[in-house]
Structure formats: structure tokens, C-alpha cells
Image (spheres, helix red, strand yellow):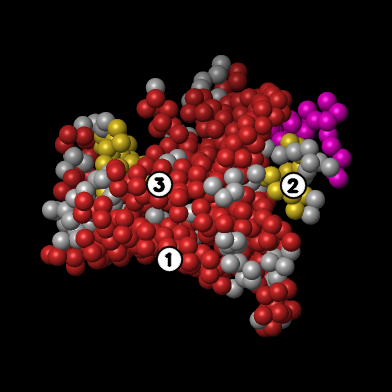
Amino acid sequence: MWDKFKDQIQVFGRSLLLPIGIMAPVGMLMGLMGAFTQSYMIEQFPILGNETLQTVLSSTQQISSIIFSNIPVLFAMGVAYGMAKNEKGIAVFSSIISYLVLITTMNVYLNATGNLADPEVMNELGQGMVLGIQTIRVDAAGGIISGLLAAKLTDKFYRVQLPLAFAFFSGKKSVLILSFLFTVPIGLVLPFIWGIFTRMLIGMSPILMNQPFGAGIYALLNRALIPFGLHHVLAAVVRFTEAGGTWVIEGEYYVGILNAMNEVLFELGPSHEAWGRIMPQISPYLASGQMLTTLFRIPAIGLAMYHTAYKENKKLAKGIILTVVLTAFLGNITEPMEFSFMFISPILYIVYIILAGITVIPLAMMNVSIGYIRGTIFDFVIFGLLYENTGWINLVLVGIANFVIFYFVFRYLIVKLDAKTPGREDVNRNVTLLNEKRYGDIAQLVIEGLGGKENVAQVDNCVSRLRIDLKDQKVVNADKLKEAGASGIFFPKKNHVHVVFGPHVEFVRNEVDDYMAGK
């Protein structure tokens, strides 16, 4: 039961990647547009004051903002798609029906009980306008509830057979009807549950949002949950719920650090009092905290690995290490590096997560106010160097200290523990196929390494790894998988293997699916 529960939580965590996947690039676009329409930016770059250009920029920002105005809808669809095992399209359709019914039912409840707040004070009472309906602000949680319900109902009833007189409503159509019916009581009960849940999250908030140690606790938990695929769940909770605090900006209440960040960063700008009051507190949980990992820690670990690689392997190790470092530096994908030592040396990874928690704490004490939700070099340039009052130099100072600490600790421990990091293993990984994007050849090697088609029960993937259910793990050929270009191979449980391909994983997955289907 525990293994099954853990698997479901991992699938749930991966399902959150879908809405986050659209939020990240659109957020970057909205951030650029928002930055270039700010008066302080126009003063520094007068060319931005062109009326036509400003119309284009402000219009693009307005279009981009629709994504962040409908985060619950995105989560409903993403969770339904990720969690449903069958008929994912019906699950997504049902999730929207469920969410619309949910917010409307809560509006009916508020009206019936006389608790519908006046517009002037509805934010203070946890209410707000959602898709034109005044309801309880359950935010992303409402979307998640609808997504989970839709996925469960789809898997259970998509083939249900009704009596002949009602045959038209059988199967997939029944899922839509049941989504409606099941959501109504949820919408009536949720106000009570939400009150309890809100108090629990608020109770967690002093720990996670403690200044300055909360950022360290969050960073430690975030890195510690990566092997289980649960770090996305933690991030979502802090970004979108009361666990990330409730922030008052010009009399309005903003739940979660990301909602507050959006308002201060894109609407108010560095000259507003909220910039100095709020941004230094929430920035370490978002971009600037992640920048410590992508811009400083990962390169430091990579350099330590290169310097400790065997002489005869340095040339090959250099290519591997440089690839995973650039993947983090440019794309904010750190897992390929982390998986390169996570399971071959658990002690090394434990040290890594402890250091990650400790070394982010100074960031929360040095008035760093850099957005956005990613943590790449592009964010540093756009939201660090081009914005005023960001304290970017403090991030660099803390980053340099992180680089030095991680480099020397890893260099010492790799040698001390004789960790088989890239360049220190007996079998060298082949990156030629990946570099040449020969995904069809890679897929063939992967299937052969897994013991053939008949040994593969199910194939899935997350952001950097294939997740494969097997019939017999004893026949897996690790050498064949390394020949395919895998940077990590491990068994989190019996007959279930993870094969790490980094940012190539989705292309590899597509070819594996085609190969399994005989295409």
C-alpha cells in the first residue's frame, strides 16, 4: 500500500509539470513585457517610449496575463491529464466541468448562508472573482481537486454500461455527468474543509516562511524530495497556497509567494514600497534561490567532477559534465547533474541537500530582490541587471561563496568516498548518439537494454528520465543503456527502473513508444 501511495504521489507531482511548463515561458514573456512597459525602464531606455512599441508590449503583456489569471483551470486540466490512466481527453473535459460546478456551488453556498462578502472586503474574507463568479478563493487547490476527481471518475466509469433506455449516456458521457454530480457535494463541504486546511497551511507558514531560516528549510526539502519526484508538489504548495504566506499589497491580499511576486514585479516595479518590503523575503524561494544552484553550485560540482576524473577519461568526462552544467545554466534543469551522483553515492547527495539548505540562508539576509520563477542566466540578466534595486551583487557574492564551498567539499568527498562520478567509472557513457540526435537508434538500444519489448510493461517519463515498469528487472543490461547515452540507471523499487537522459528524454520517449508499437 505504501509503494502504491508513493507511486501515485510521484505521478501527481509529474502532472503539475504540465501547467508549470506553460507558466514558465509565458511568465518569461510577461516579465519582459512588464519590464519594458515600466516607467523607470522607459526612462533608462527612451526608445521604449515609442507609442506603437508600447502598445505592442502592453498588449502582449495583457495576453500573457491570461495564463496567470486562470491558474486553477490549468491545474485542473494538467492534473486530470497526468493522473488519468485511460481516456485522458475525457478526463480533461470533465475537469473543466467539475471546476465550473465547484466555484458556482460555493457561490450558492455563500449566498444561501448569507456569507457572500461585499466586493470591498471580499479579499479579506478569502473570497474573490473567479471566471466572473464571486466564490471562495481555493485557487490552485480547487483546480487540483477537480483534476483528481475527473481522473478518478474517468478511469472508473469510462466503460460503464447503462440500461438500454439510457444507453446514450453510457461510457464516456457518463463521466461528464458524474463529474457534475460528484462536484456539487464537494462544493458544499469544501468551505468547511477549506477553513481547516487554511489554518493548517497558515500554521506551516511560520516554519517555511521564517526569516531568514525558512528559505533554507525550503531549499533543503526541495532538494531532498527530488529523488521521489515530489519537489514540484512542495513548490506548488508554497507558490500558490497559504503555506507561502498571505501578502498585503495596497490593501489587497495575495496568497502564495508567486502571486505576490507577480504583482510587485510586473505591476508595481522597484520604486514601490512593496519592492523593498516583500521582494527580499520571497526572492530566495524563487529565482534567486534557484540561481545559486544553476549558476554556481552545479558548475562547482561539475568542475570538482572534472578535476577528480581519471586522466584517461577526462576528455570524455569533460563533454558529459559540460552538457549537464549548461543544461542547468541555460535551462534550469538540474536533475541530470544530481542523478549523476545521487544513487552512486547517497552520502554525497545527503551532503548536497544539507549544504543547499544552509548556504541559501545568507541570501535571505542580504536584500536580494530578483524575479522570476526560473533560475537561469537569462533571468539574472533580465530581472537582475536590468531592474533597479535588485541587489544582484549580493547574489553574486553569496554565489561565489557557494561555488567555493561546493567545489572543495565535492572534490574532497568524491576522492574520499571513491564515488564513481563521470570520468571515474570503468564503463564510459556514450554521448555520440545523443549529440547526433539519433533517437531511433537510442530507443532500440534502450529496449534491448531493458530485456526486449516483452519485458517492458509500461513506459512513462518526467522532465529528465524514463520511468519504466518491467516484468523482470534481472534481465536489464546496464551497459547497453549506457551505450544508448543514459547518464543514470537506478531501481527505486522492484521491477521499476529510471533511466536518465536529461533534456533529451521526451524525444527518446517518443521513439521508444514508436519502437514498442512496431512503427
Q: Residue at x 44, y 32 (%)?
A: 8
Q: Which residue is mark 1?
A: 400
Provide residue 242's location: percent of width, then percent of height: 64, 40
Badge 2: few (under 14), some or many (20 or more) residues near its Cα, within 10 Å? some
Judge whether 13 appears above or below 163 on screen.
below
Which residues are drawn in magenta?
94-120
**Between disc 3 and disc 1, whose residue precedes?**
3
Front position among marks 2 and 1? 1
Residue 104 forms part of the magenta stretch: yes
Viewer-proximal residue, 183 or 270? 270
Residue 203 placement: quadrant: top right
Judge whether 446 appears above or below 141 on screen.
below
Provide residue 229's location: percent of width, then percent of height: 41, 41
Q: Residue at x 51, y 45 (%)?
A: 218
Q: Which residue is mark 3?
A: 354
Circle number at residue 149: none
Badge 1: few (under 14), some or many (20 or more) residues near its Cα, within 10 Å? some
Q: Residue at x 83, y 25 (%)?
A: 113
Q: Which residue is mark 2?
A: 253
Q: CA distance from mark 3 to mark 1?
A: 18 Å
The amino acid type, in three-letter code, at marker 2 is Tyr
Q: CA distance from mark 2 to mark 1?
A: 36 Å
Provide residue 296's location: percent of width, then percent of height: 41, 63
